[in-house]
Amino acid sequence: MADKFIDFSKEREKNLTPFNEVIDVSSLSFFYDKIYTVFTACVSLPHSEIQIPLILAYICTPSAMSNRLPICFFQGKSGSGKSKAGMFANNLYGVDILQESATTASIRNELNNRKFILHPEDGATQLEQNTILVWDDLRPVRISPTSPDSIFGMLKSGCSRQTSQSKIALPGGKTQEFCTFGLKVISSISPIWAYPGCEELIRRSMPFRFEKVVSSDVEFIDIETIEIFELSLQLKNFWFDTSILNEYQAIRKTITHMKSEHKEFKTFCVDILTTLSIISEIPLKEVIQLFNEYCSTVREPMLNNTIVDEILDTWLLDKKESLKEENAEFVEQGLEEFVQEKLEIPSVQVYKFLKSRINDGSIDLQRIDNPYIHELMIKQGFTSKITKHGLIWQET
């Protein structure tokens, strides 16, 4: 019997391929160019010229230097790449992704362990480190203030350093203090910020839209198969440069006083915009312009949709894709007479779908009636018609 211990995790890590062996970055010396190239080789987004720079800026923002940070949401249907983007952020910091089942107490402990280390020359002094929390595939019910062990309070108070200190009671009359401030990335198929009771998260939300790539010509690299330790080390060393830290302070002061069309939300994003300016060397005026475009093109439309709208929209998109596939099969088999040009859905199916989402905790509705379904489907671009089989909703 072997008398030595084998760390199988080290053996498993040998299966990973260094990113620069599968992604050509040989001509790139600039850190931002490298992470941009690797990220876009693994993930695709709509409005990429607006979304990707801000996603990378958010991920790379030094949390230990920051004062206010919004909550970053990656939202899109299954298979849209949002989890891959979260994994990229996670791997860049070399930390584990949080699962939905993680308790609030365990999350606080995890964040404290990641954020603070003891001073090498003074064991009584703690030093704050840059880090990030990444949740994958989180359901809205996990954030609802009425849910057991909700993380709503942690998210709400953790956007500002001034409000992020919380205390919990320990046995023996003692208390333990936690700092919940920091970078937080949440991926979900649902617009979590729109869940009833979570309205306070809306002004603190920085959502990004992910969509499935339908083109078969596009082939992305699986982030789970590559190792980006070199980039992780470069990010860490980047913020160890005192000249860059001095530049950070100067640029942050300038951005703080720059005008934006979205003044209130900009106060949450000063550190992110400062990071974007430094790592990408985009001129400050262009940084503010990109931020304004993101707010009007991506953020505001996403925040204006309710969670029911988003969930129903995703379901209807799946129905439309299935119809296209069925029509293609009919054409291939020479059965053109069975091709259905427009999607038709019985109203009872809509009711059953919404009811199932209430039961699994995705949405919170007291009741579903015909007038409410009528309102939802009209908003989705459907018209109703009466048939011998009952009420049918038809795509316009």
Image (cartoon, grey):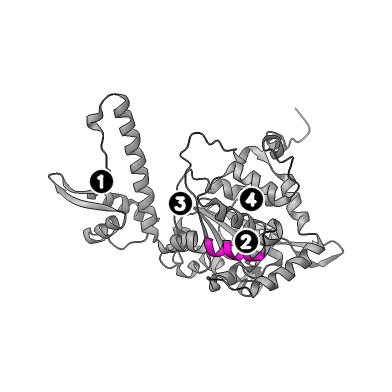
Q: Earlier in the sequence, mark 3 or mark 1?
A: 3
User: Among all residues in the image, which is located at the extreme right?
Assistant: 121
Residue 70 image point, x, y percent: 57, 65
> Real-space Cα distance between discs 1 and 4?
41 Å
Per the rendering, the mark at residue 90 is 4
Residue 119 located left or right of residue 358: right
Residue 92 image point, x, y percent: 68, 50
| Residue occupying the point 28% across, 50% down | 350
- Please tell me whether mark 1 or mark 2 is closer to you in this view: 1
- Please tell me whether mark 3 or mark 1 is closer to you in this view: 1
| Residue occupying the point 20% across, 52% down | 384
Q: Can you say whether 148 is above or below 166 in the image? A: above
Q: 174 or 297: which is nearer to us?
A: 297
Crowdedness of circle 3 by 10 Å Cα count: few (<14), some, many (20+)? many
Magenta region, main secondary structure: helix
What segment is highlighted magenta in the picture? 284-294
Q: Are marks 2 and 3 in contact (CB under 8 Å)?
A: no
> Real-space Cα distance between discs 4 and 2?
11 Å
Residue position marked by numbered label 3 in the rendering: 189
Q: Earlier in the sequence, mark 1 or mark 4?
A: 4
Q: Is 239 in the magenta? A: no
Query: Is any atom of residue 360 visible in this view?
Result: no
Element at badge 3? loop
Residue position marked by numbered label 1 in the rendering: 345
Q: Earlier in the sequence, mark 2 or mark 3?
A: 2
Give the amino acid type for the residue marked by disc 3 in the picture.
Ile
